[in-house]
Amino acid sequence: MVDEVVRESNRKSAVGPRFLSLGGKLTEQCGWQQVESFISAEQEIRSVQEGVGLSDLSPLTKIDLRMKDPVTAWPLLFPENPVLSEFGKPGYHLIQRDHIKSHPVLVARTARENFFITSLSGVAPTIEQSIRETVAGGGVSVTDVTSGYSAFELSGPSATFVLQK
């Protein structure tokens, strides 16, 4: 257990060095080193309320899900939402195994057989196990890609304007 904690506490966001060079202050969250702030909390809140703010959400669980037959596998994984997710239209779902609901996940269909799942930090092993047990032998590949991808939240009234640039 100690080795696992040490290993996880060494995780760093891909944008951490850039944020540090801009004066960011480090903190640890869910075993990840992250920049907590650049200025005082009050100033950051005001900046987001009046303009735009960028949050590093890299510790979120990220799963690459590939299904050879998504039409068959999808209702097994998401019985409450049996209609296959549309391309480019993310949706919130609950993975269900043995009639027990798992963690909430956001699923985005990225290709005909590929899906990208995000969820709460640190739940990748549980989600992977739930998927594998639910569709065992069903032509499904599930890979934890949390450390390989960053995730961001752009918020504030100017967020849309920034994204349109």
Image (tube, rainbow, N blue to C red):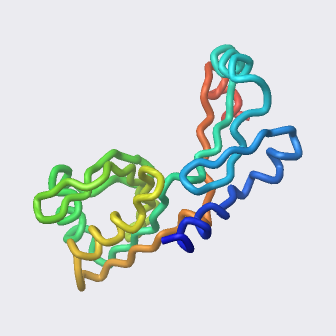
Q: Residue at x 74, y 18 (%)?
A: 43
**Residue at 68% in and 48% down:** 34
In-image side of 136 versus 15 (left or right) = left
Q: Is residue 50 left or right of residue 17?
A: left
Point out the residue furthest to the front here: 2
| Residue 21 in picture, x, y percent from top left | 88, 46
Image coordinates of residue 88 in percent, x first then y, are: 45, 51
Nearest to the observer: residue 111 or residue 141? 141
Residue name at image x 62 percent, y 28 percent:
160
Q: Quadrant of residue 154?
A: top right
**Direction from residue 114 to residue 17 in the image, left or right:** right
Between 156 and 115, the one lying in front of the other is 156
Corner quadrant of residue 51: top right
Q: Is residue 88 or residue 64 the one in the foreground?
A: 64
Q: Position of residue 152 (x, y in %)?
A: 61, 44
From the top left corner, tell me how far across and down residue 82 is, in percent: 18, 55
- Residue at image coords 74%, 44%: 26
Depicted 86 relative to depicted 133: above or below: above
Label tally: 0
Spot the residue most to the left. 99
Q: Is residue 156 left or right of residue 73?
A: right
Give the position of the C terminus as an image quadrant.
Answer: top right
Residue 50 occupies quadrant: top right
